[in-house]
Image (cartoon, rainbow, N blue to C red):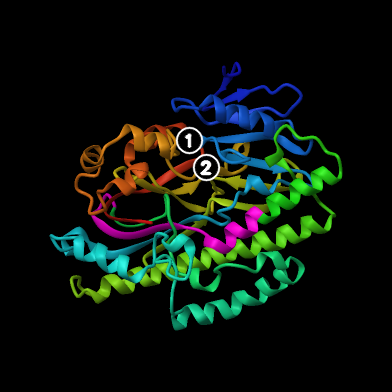
Amino acid sequence: MQTEQTRRGSYNVIPVKDGAPIKAWTVGVPFEAAAEAQVQRIATMPFIHKWVAVMPDVHAGIGATVGSVIATNRAIIPAAVGVDIGCGMMAVRTNLLASSLPDDLRPLRLAIEEAVPHGRTDNGGPNDKGAWRDLPHEQTLVWSHLKVGYDGIVAKHPKLDRGWHATHLGTLGTGNHFIEICLDEQDQVWFMLHSGSRGVGNRIGSYFIELARQDMARWFINLPDKDLAYFPEGTDHFDDYVEAVSWAQEYARTNRDLMMRQVIQAVRSTGLLPEFDATLEVVNCHHNFVAREHHFGQNVLVTRKGAVRARREDLGIIPGSMGARSFVVRGKENQDSFHSCSHGAGRAMSRTEARKRFSVEDHVQATHGVECRKDEDVIDETPMAYKPIDAVMHAQRDLVEVLYTLRQVVCVKG
């Protein structure tokens, strides 16, 4: 049963016994009881600054809630960033028009799929199709710069030095990660993609979440949820985590840059389009990250898990689903949200539930007009598994202004 809420303009205020209040931009959108209970546990942590902000795409996550913005004083919860560190969006506007696209979009999708490793096979082993087997020259050069920071991290935490790192640069991953060709209201062509720090970021996130749990046990600190284990500022593990998560965020942003270049080159190489400029507008933003910021008179750490920073100078991307609109936005610097907005539509149900509830035919109908995979392996990503993006955007109208509304015509899923 959900706690009594008080409406304050466009958001609800939820009191928390022995904790900070919750400000939730969930008017008109579902806020599942499990997610609310999870946020309430976060709000009882002793170092919360002011309140916990909840975005309209909120849903329960591992440890911390997806769609949560948590400002803290002198402590950090690794699970409040999660394991897909630096996951985010990138979009570029071109001077191409819809009329420049071929009638048959399948060759464009296939070219992108060929140019960008995606998915996962061989349990992530040597034959994994989602990683490079022979590292391209550009990835080799980029890794030579990232490797300096990586070597410093693994020197202190050698258990992190396993699995792929360089071979995931410029690769998509799985799940809800995607690459799209979209059209805006003026029928101008955009390229858009969603991915993060891949395997190396997952290892860093998982490792430090477990390390925080061990610290809590060693210090006999009881928590409302073991996944809310934290590092106090001033400890070695705090500094090491901040260093590692910052590096993973840089890796994630670089990964998106590389993929976008691969996508543009792949589309050009088909010979199906005229020469075009892909630099008219470029947006690259995280939505799983931590940053040092100043809010309400104090310097604090802000973790956003499934949320985008939305200061006045910030451009962000809020995608819908495989069959719904997406939005390029500018922040309104809303103080109550700690200058944040949602990172997408947000799941309305689990992947397991989506597979049970929907058929391939349902998915085919929901993605009509979009050149994409239409098979049982993507049922968990079907549009019906997500909240209605229009309701999500209306709920956060005081957080962002919409600059462009995009509809996808090609979608590549990991």
Instruction: Pinpoint residue 81: horizontal percent, then vertical percent.
Output: 62, 49
Residue plotted at (19% across, 75% down): 271
Above or below residue 294? Residue 204 is below
Residue contact at pointers 2 and 1, CB within 8 angstroms: yes
Residue found 39% across the figure and 37% down from its top? 386
* Residue that label 1 marks: 396
Which contiguous range is marked in magenta?
Answer: 184-206
User: Percent position (x, y) of residue 322?
Assistant: 32, 46
Query: Please, what is the three-letter code of the amino acid marked with disc 1?
Result: Gln
Q: Is residue 127 left or right of residue 273?
A: right
Q: Which residue is mark 2?
A: 341
Looking at the image, is 392 positioned above or below residue 127? above
Coordinates of residue 52 in the picture (x, y in percent): 65, 35
Visible residue check, residue 72: yes
Q: Nearer the viewer, residue 369 or 273?
A: 369
Measuring 56% from the left and 57% from the top, which residue is drawn there?
86
Could you classify mark 2 by the number of other residues whose Cα lies within 10 Å: few (under 14), some (14-19), or many (20 or more)? many
- Give the quadrant of the N terminus: top right
Asked whether 189 falls inside the magenta stretch, the response is yes
Among the two numbered marks 2 and 1 on one chain, the one whose residue lies closer to the N terminus: 2
Q: Quadrant of the image for the C terminus? A: bottom left
Res 38 → quadrant = top right
Tag 1's secondary structure?
loop
In screen coordinates, is 91 left or right of 409? Answer: right
Amino acid bearing label 2: Cys
